[in-house]
Amino acid sequence: MMPAPRLEIDLEKIHHNADTLVKRLARRGISVTGVCKATLGSTEIANALLQAGVSFLGDSRIENIEAMRLAHVPAKMVLIRSPMLSQVKRVIMSADVSCNTEVEVIRQLSQVAQKAHRTHGVVLMVELGDRREGIMPEDLIKTVRQTLCLPNIVLKGIGTNLACRCGIAPDARNMAELSALAELIEATFDLKLEVVSGGNSANLEWDLSGAKTGRINNLRLGEAILLGCETLHRQPLDGLFTDAFTLVAEVIESKVKPSQPSGTIAQTAFGEASAVIDRGLIMQSILALGRQDTDPNGLLPPAGIEIMGASSDHLILVSDSRALSVGSEVSFQLNYSALVLAMTSPFVARVIKSPALHR
Ligand SMILES: *Cc1c(COP(=O)(O)O)cnc(C)c1O
């Protein structure tokens, strides 16, 4: 018996997606950092990305980078979130490069790196409109000057991140600004920046549009590789698989019930009011799956099945005519939110398909 709930992971599809994007972007002079923060440090997925030719692996959590190191994943690893001061030592020991926005953090990275006789690469992140992380452009030169003074720290480059907090789209204006900042740094300090990282999956549309990419020579891609879509409009990308991941759950109850609740209506388990349309009697099933396992709003059910509601441990379905028998299984496609939560839930098993790619 296969465990349930489980995530079925098709490594060949992930490899194909990464390989396709690496090749398309290489034609534009852009390397790929494979962002695996949604995979909880999965060695198999990390190796599939490396075999597809990504130049770096990126993760937002040092725990995942440590896990991949322990499993001997042979990659340059980038911590793509600014290090916590409380984790500086771990960052120096496991990550080759980190993205940074605070000089205080880079100072401490330098101190620990000196003690450990290691060098650490720094990418300075610049704020270009999305108002999440980043140094304000007018402060960048000063921060570069401070960074260059620090022993055992190597300034690898600059980067920016858009479309995450406010949905600001990468475009000719903000990408030209990043290029101009790279050139300003190089002219001011007479050096060459190895990496100018233009952004994440939201950048693909612009970077593949044929527009002049300027100095941008790297993208950090997570969702586009794992789920095969761009992230400005969540459209599938040409030639990529959108179903590399499937979440499978088991039916624990199946009954004809009135669609309408009966009694006095107060709050639900999660405090929202319940909006229920009266459809008379329905074929209602319950899956052993809930918010402890995934984001129920991010699940795409198969044809003929609709998600009616969810609590911590129950997912309520209505099926058009056929009853879902107790013990049978239902498979869903997932969006990024559902994927991250399923991958990181201790209740969800992970089953890797296409073992041919195992190393
Ligand atoms: C998550 C993240 C990425 C990858 O984003 P996707 O939309 O999954 O491609 C890139 N850069 C940073 C800083 C991130 O936090």
Image (spheres, rainbow, N blue to C red):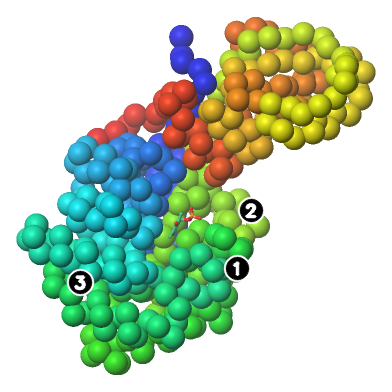
Secondary structure beneath label 2: loop
Q: Amino acid at mark 1?
A: Ile
**From where the camera sits, is residue 331 visible?**
no
Q: Residue 302 lies in what quarter of the image?
A: top right
**In the rendered structure, which disc, 1 or 3, sits on the residue that comes first in sequence?**
3
Secondary structure beneath label 3: strand
Q: State the separation of the CA atoms marked 2 and 1.
A: 17 Å
Please tell me which residue is depicted at 29% across the width and 81% down the height of the picture.
144
* Residue under label 1: 168
Q: Residues within 10 Å of mark 3 (few under 14, many from 20)?
A: some
User: Nearest the camera: 273 or 59?
Assistant: 273
* Residue under label 3: 154
* Residue under label 2: 235
Q: State the separation of the CA atoms marked 1 and 3.
A: 30 Å
- Could you say where residue 314 lies in the image, as x and y percent from the top left? 64, 20
Q: Residue 103 lies in what quarter of the image?
A: bottom left
Please tell me which residue is depicted at 56% across the width and 43% down the height of the picture.
337
